[in-house]
């Protein structure tokens, strides 16, 4: 067992509330824990994270199986990266106090951007979620993972690119994938195992570099890349203007008769910079 203390505010209960939207996540909101599937040195490891503190003074208990102690630091580093434990949410909260988003930052005080558990998972999930309502998107992702991934300690791991590259379009069609979406995921996985795309190296690249690299692949457009940057890599200044959820959230918040235009949305962005990703998250939270 390992204890971690971080700077507040950090509302782990709201983190669990958002993670609970995805049926693949194994968690208990009342007991305040979640189990996270990690791949450390290609070894699958399940880490249980339990909150033991409060929003202003967050502390956590981490548990995992007995493994080589040389991997402990890598586990800590990955958990801190996923849950954004090194980021000051207080500074971000204060930044939005003089903006139109103040009510949302009061309501969802201390909510971090929690990342998908692996960049490859994030890319695959983004492709699956394209042009689907959220409920069916999660259902389709769950079918994909439980059919071709594997389970350890009751936690599901996404299938590796090597597994997905061997699938046929027809196999994914049987899960209710569209033909194109099946092709996109299989092609992406093939590019990874051929060495043409290294998802681990993306973290070191700029947003523009990642956009130019990924836009070349079939099925990966601007929306998918923006979501990867935000939820796969934790970039702080992303605002997917074309996202329908954000448009609906702004319509509700600003009490508009119809969804805001692109120009109306762009006019709001300067005062939210350089934390546009948090503006996006809190707007999503307001309608979830």
Image (cartoon, rainbow, N blue to C red):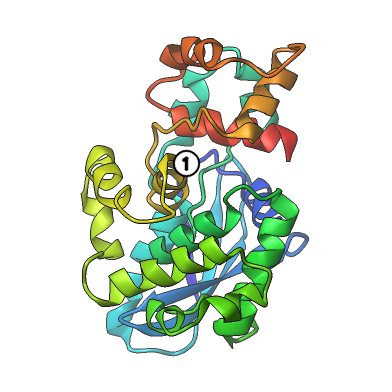
The part of the image, by quadrant, that contains residue 57 is: top right
95 shown above or below 157:
above
232 shown above or below 70:
above
| Residue 280 visible from this viewpoint | yes
The part of the image, by quadrant, that contains residue 87 is: top left
Relative to 239, is 145 on the left or the right?
right
User: Which residue matches tag 1?
Assistant: 223
39 shown above or below 209:
below
Relative to 106, is 113 on the left or the right?
left
Q: Residue at x 47, y 30 (%)?
A: 239
- Secondary structure under the numbered disc 1 in the rendered image: helix
267, 262: nearer the viewer: 262
| Residue 25 visible from this viewpoint | no
142, 154: nearer the viewer: 142
Q: Position of residue 171 (x, y in %)?
A: 59, 81
108, 254: nearer the viewer: 254
Q: Position of residue 198 (x, y in %)?
A: 25, 65
Q: Position of residue 242 (x, y in %)?
A: 53, 30
249 shown above or below 260:
below
Q: Residue at x 46, y 17 (%)?
A: 269
How many C-alpha atoms fall within 10 Å of the one at disc 1: few (<14), some, or many (≥20)?
some
Q: Residue at x 65, y 34 (%)?
A: 245
Q: Residue at x 61, y 86 (%)?
A: 153
């Amino acid at each position: 067992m390992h204890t971690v203390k971080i700077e507040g505010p950090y509302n782990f209960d709201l983190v669990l509330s958002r993670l609970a939207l995805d049926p693949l996540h194994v968690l208990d909101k009342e007991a305040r824990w979640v189990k996270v599937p990690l791949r450390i040195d290609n070894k699958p490891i399940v880490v249980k994270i339990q909150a033991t503190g409060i929003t202003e003074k967050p502390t956590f208990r981490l548990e995992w199986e007995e493994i080589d102690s040389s991997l402990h630091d890598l586990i800590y580093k990955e958990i801190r990266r996923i849950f954004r434990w090194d980021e000051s949410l207080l500074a971000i909260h204060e930044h939005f106090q003089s903006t139109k988003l103040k009510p949302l930052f009061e309501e969802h005080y201390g909510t971090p951007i929690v990342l998908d558990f692996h960049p490859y998972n994030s890319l695959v999930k983004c492709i699956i979620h394209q042009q689907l309502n959220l409920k069916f998107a999660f259902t389709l992702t769950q079918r994909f993972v439980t059919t071709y991934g594997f389970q350890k300690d009751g936690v599901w791991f996404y299938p590796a690119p090597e597994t997905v590259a061997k699938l046929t379009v027809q196999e994914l069609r049987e899960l209710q994938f569209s033909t194109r979406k099946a092709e996109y995921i299989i092609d992406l996985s093939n590019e990874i195992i051929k060495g043409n795309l290294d998802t681990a190296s993306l973290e070191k690249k700029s947003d523009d570099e990642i956009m130019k690299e990924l836009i070349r692949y079939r099925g990966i457009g601007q929306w998918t890349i923006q979501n990867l940057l935000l939820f796969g890599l934790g970039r702080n200044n992303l605002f997917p203007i074309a996202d329908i959820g954000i448009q609906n959230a702004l319509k509700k918040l600003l009490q508009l008769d119809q969804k805001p235009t692109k120009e109306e949305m762009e006019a709001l962005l300067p005062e939210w910079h350089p934390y546009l990703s948090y503006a996006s998250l809190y707007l999503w939270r307001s309608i979830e």
